Amino acid sequence: MDHFHYQDGELFAENVPVAKIAAQFGTPTYIYSRATLTRHFQAYQQALGKHPHLICFAVKANANIAVLNVLAKLGAGFDIVSVGELERVLAAGGDPKKVVFSGVGKQPHEMRRALSVGVHCFNVESIAELEQLQAVASDMDTVANISIRVNPDVDPQTHPYISTGLKENKFGIDINEAVAVYAQASRLSHISIKGIDCHIGSQLTSLPPFLDALDRLLALVDALEDKGITIQHLDLGGGLGVPYQNEQPPAPDTYASAILKRLGGRSLELIFEPGRSIAANAGILITRVDYLKPTATKHFAIVDAAMNDLLRPALYQAWQEIIPVTPRHDCPPHTYDVVGAICETSDFLGKDRALAIQPQDLLAIRSAGAYGFVMSSNYNTRNRAAEVMVDVDQFHLIRKRETITEQLANEQLLPE
Ligand SMILES: Cc1ncc(COP(=O)(O)O)c(C=O)c1O
Ligand SMILES: N[C@@H](CCCC[NH3+])C(=O)O
């Protein structure tokens, strides 16, 4: 059963009526389902079974510490891209030994903190970064575990802004240069080679690009072995897509089983860094209709969420389903552009949606648990949304709605 579903003519999150959450905490509010997060995470775990593995949730997809805590308790590791994300993982009770540190621009202070808490591995993305890490580790008299993030030049067939494994992207080290970079790393006194890594893009909806990348990485593992460099883990990144509309991506267990099969008898530990496939469909964003505005050419539904709350439609023309919380049958549907109050024409949450709605009705934007709240901003001096977690028939405020007082607290006037 879907954990967001209609029952008796209204939308429920697990066993809680969504309207009840809106009545208590207002709108716009993100609502997450603990059961869905758990189910998605466990699908990966179960598919990999006894094969040595680590599922590192990509914190960038949803960084709320209650969400991270739910996953940490299930045994998750975490993929981070900043020291800020590391502090969130620690605050959420995550195990630093299960953390992989990705990203093209790690700063020395971030390396220092990650080394001091003992992260599993740095996914190194350039020679300059490798040298910086050697310097920091040497200064701390410690050893940094690394894998090289290889850019395998595979087309992930996704939106160009979220494709990362092509030669022209800024990510990783060209696969043709990887052997030389590993050889260089093997000569560094405070670097220990552990793994190999890639991440080719996000919202991939088919297996072949993953398998293609995996084959290229395995060939590299063999070439390195021939040179006396043994790789212990293979990190295939994240990137598995979700059904937003009509897409039919493989489910996490199908994906994980296919990868495992392709590994053959190799004993390499497998690391995945899924974000979206765990969190996206574990969340909705609820919003209230403020005004209906018919014009000569369109019907606009102006709602209290906007592009500052959910940026994906404005940034990628992403499509996310918009449904009424309490469907009504007393007025005809119209085709609406569902828009926010921000002074930008790109401020829309959905275009051309058939909805039967009246002012004050509640709407839910689906698939909002990943790259939703984390990409929100204060543009137009709007306060960030609240976040709520539903757990069977309970619901908990896991981040309170921001206030203007909190926004102003960090600013000050120039001295007289
Ligand atoms: C290095 C890395 N790992 C993991 C992820 C998570 O990707 P997704 O949310 O598509 O699973 C990303 C984002 O695309 C990433 O850049
Ligand atoms: N923010 C993107 C995904 C970015 C993936 C990060 N590497 C999205 O909403 O689809």
Image (spheres, grey):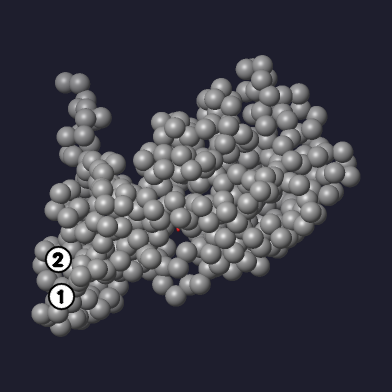
Residue located 71% across and 50% down the image: 174
Dividing the picture into quadrants, the one containing residue 156 is bottom right
Q: Which residue is mark 1?
A: 328
Tell me residue 215's x, y (percent): 75, 59
Q: Amino acid at mark 2?
A: Asp
Q: Is mark 2 within 8 Å of ligand 2?
A: no
Q: Which residue is mark 2?
A: 361
From the viewer's perspective, tell me whether residue 358 is left or right of residue 377.
left
Depth check: give the residue in front, 217 or 387.
387
Query: For the residue labelled by badge 1, is the local secondary structure a helix, a strand or a loop?
Result: loop
On residue 308, which mark appears?
none
Q: Amino acid at mark 1?
A: Arg
Residue 163 visible in the snapshot: no
Q: Is residue 286 above or below residue 324?
A: above
Residue located 42% across and 52% down the image: 37
Tell me residue 269's x, y (percent): 69, 45
From the viewer's perspective, tell me whether residue 3 is left or right of residue 90.
left
Query: For the residue labelled by badge 2, is the local secondary structure a helix, a strand or a loop?
Result: loop
Quadrant of the image containing the N terminus: bottom left
Dividing the picture into quadrants, the one containing residue 342 is bottom left
Marks 1 and 2 in Cβ contact (< 8 Å): yes
From the viewer's perspective, tell me whether residue 270 is left or right of residue 29.
right
Depth check: give the residue in front, 65 or 288.
65
Q: CA distance from mark 1 to mark 2?
A: 9 Å
Residue located 24% across and 65% down the image: 11
